[in-house]
Image (cartoon, rainbow, N blue to C red):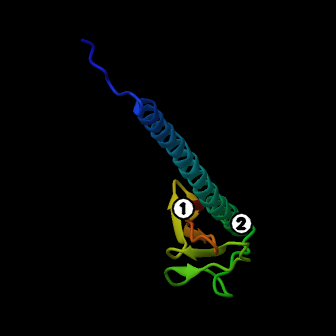
Amino acid sequence: MMIKTNEKGMALIVTLVLSFVALGFIAAILYLLNTSTSGSGATKRYSMALETAKGVSDYVVEKILSDELTCSGSSCDSGESIDIDIAPPDHNVNAKMLSDPKKVTLSGVDYTIYSIRVEAENNKTNDKAIIEFVYRVY
């Protein structure tokens, strides 16, 4: 005697399982695409703030070399952490002299050493880049 098996619903179950597996793969791909896009945007916003800070650093060095650097409307020779006068671009930019310019003589050569901190922050996204550098003029 032959045993009858009921396989009427098996095709439906297999189809549903395969559909859920395919749906899981599609959801994973969409998630990866979305996170990589937001990561790319964050990198772009940070690099914009970093390039702004680099540009302001170049501006400050140019002003030092031309002896036109001013801090809070006067010379930058007194006080610590003095704001440097700059024309801010699209970002919120703050440049500070970290300490008085130091006058040093090495091997008979007179040097002036400046220590400067430049902070650039994107007004919309609050991405921030900070550059601190020391510049020597002789």
Q: Residue at x 69, y 75 (%)?
A: 69
Q: Which residue has dot 1 on it? A: 134
Quarter in which the C terminus is drawn? bottom right
Q: Residue at x 54, y 84 (%)?
A: 78
Q: Is residue 82 above or below residue 133?
A: below
Residue 91 in percent (x, y) is at 67, 72
Q: Is residue 21 above or below residue 71?
A: above
Q: Work out whether mark 2 precedes mark 1 in sequence or the reverse, and give the earlier one.
A: 2
Which quarter of the picture shows residue 44? Answer: bottom right
Label 2 – label 1 distance at C-alpha: 14 Å
Residue 104 in percent (x, y) is at 51, 65
User: Do we see residue 110 in this rendering?
Assistant: no
How many numbered marks have been drawn onto this rendered protein structure? Answer: 2
Q: Nearer the viewer, residue 36 or 76?
A: 36
Q: Which residue has dot 2 on it? A: 59
Q: Secondary structure at mark 2?
A: helix
Quarter in which the N terminus is drawn? top left
Task: Characterize the local packing of mark 1: few (<14), some (14-19) or many (20 or more) Cα atoms within 10 angstroms.
Answer: few
**Amino acid type shown at disc 1:** Val
Residue 18 in percent (x, y) is at 47, 34
Instruction: Give the farthest residue toward the bottom.
Output: 73
Q: Secondary structure at mark 1?
A: strand
Q: Nearer the viewer, residue 124 or 112?
A: 124
From the image, state whether disc 2 or disc 1 is nearer to you.
Answer: 2
**Amino acid type shown at disc 2:** Tyr
User: Do we see residue 64 in this rendering?
Assistant: yes
Q: Could you tell whether 108 is left or right of 85 in the image?
A: left
Instruction: Give the farthest residue toward the front.
Output: 1
Q: Residue at x 50, y 38 (%)?
A: 19
Is mark 2 in CB contact (under 8 Å) with mark 1?
no
